[in-house]
Amino acid sequence: MGFVTVYMKNIKEYDSKDLEHLLSMVSPARREIALRKKDEKDQIRSCVCEILLWKGLTERGLDIEELAVSYEEKKPRLYDCFAKVMVEKTGMDPSAMNVGLDFSFSHSKDYVICGISDLPIGVDVEYLRKNLPLYSDHIFAESEEATVRNAPNPSEEFLRYWTCKESYIKCAYPKEENLRSVTLDMHHLPYAIIEDDKRKEYYFETHSLNDEYQWALCVKTRENFLLNIVEL
């Protein structure tokens, strides 16, 4: 049975005096990514993403000194540092670098989340801000507009669709697709991507967080898996 653990952290308490310490806790590659951001709060969010990843891997009993993250590809991935050296030195099969785990980051305003799984995973969190639009050509297929507009709480329904679609893009990483190209049937659990048999294997789940945020996860499976949500 597969597993999924989602770590959440409210970063409202962090400010400029914490940034240097946070930067010291992440990999050089993540530090470089964080420092490219102009906004200090975005730098903090970027650091906390990877800090949650290391915490999750440590709690699974892994030696994080032996692991590294590659941010060179559009979908970041974990690899085994020792195996990487052996691949480079001996030409060993590059698949040996794979540690068999996937992860996904997301952040919005005061919350950062990190999903870790032995299955392909994507997560997304969004803040339920005021005056959310009820329709967006960038997000919705035409068939989804009426569902959002007629929902008891259209703003929450808007975010349910948005976060699910973002989590799917992060899970499957279909580079040629955008949010509008993914049509979801969210009337019945488990939600399904319609009009495409190949994509019915993805599982979606949505949650509210502190009545101010919506978050979703997408996992490439239709089998049962263990879900653990950890709010730090």
Image (cartoon, rainbow, N blue to C red):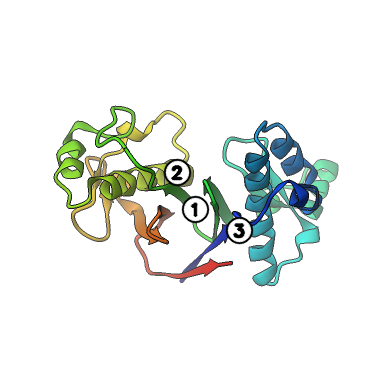
Amino acid type at mark 1: Pro
Is residue 26 visible in this depiction of the protein? Answer: no
Q: Position of residue 212 (x, y in %)?
A: 40, 54
- Is 9 above or below relative to 35? below
Contact flag, marks 1 and 2 (Cβ < 8 Å):
yes
Amino acid type at mark 3: Gly
Residue bearing the label numbered 2: 172
Q: Residue at x 67, y 35 (%)?
A: 72
Residue bearing the label numbered 1: 120
The answer for how far apart the CA atoms under marks 1 and 2 are is 7 Å
Q: Nearer the viewer, mark 3 or mark 1?
A: 1
SS at mark 2 in the image: helix
- Is 168 above or below relative to 228? above
Q: Residue at x 27, y 51 (%)?
A: 192
* Quadrant of the rendered image containing residue 132: top left
Q: Residue at x 40, y 45 (%)?
A: 168
The answer for how far apart the CA atoms under marks 3 and 1 are is 10 Å
**Which numbered disc flags the more N-terminal residue, 1 or 2?**
1
Is residue 61 visible in this depiction of the protein? Answer: yes
Q: Residues within 10 Å of mark 1 (few under 14, many from 20)?
A: many
SS at mark 1 in the image: loop
Contact flag, marks 3 and 2 (Cβ < 8 Å):
no
Q: Position of residue 50 (x, y in %)?
A: 67, 52
Residue bearing the label numbered 3: 100
Q: Residue at x 66, y 52 (%)?
A: 48
SS at mark 3 in the image: loop
Q: Nearer the viewer, residue 31 or 74?
A: 31
**Which numbered disc flags the more N-terminal residue, 3 or 1?**
3
- Is 8 above or below relative to 184? below
Q: Nearer the viewer, residue 101 or 5?
A: 5
Contact flag, marks 3 and 1 (Cβ < 8 Å):
no
Amino acid type at mark 2: Ala
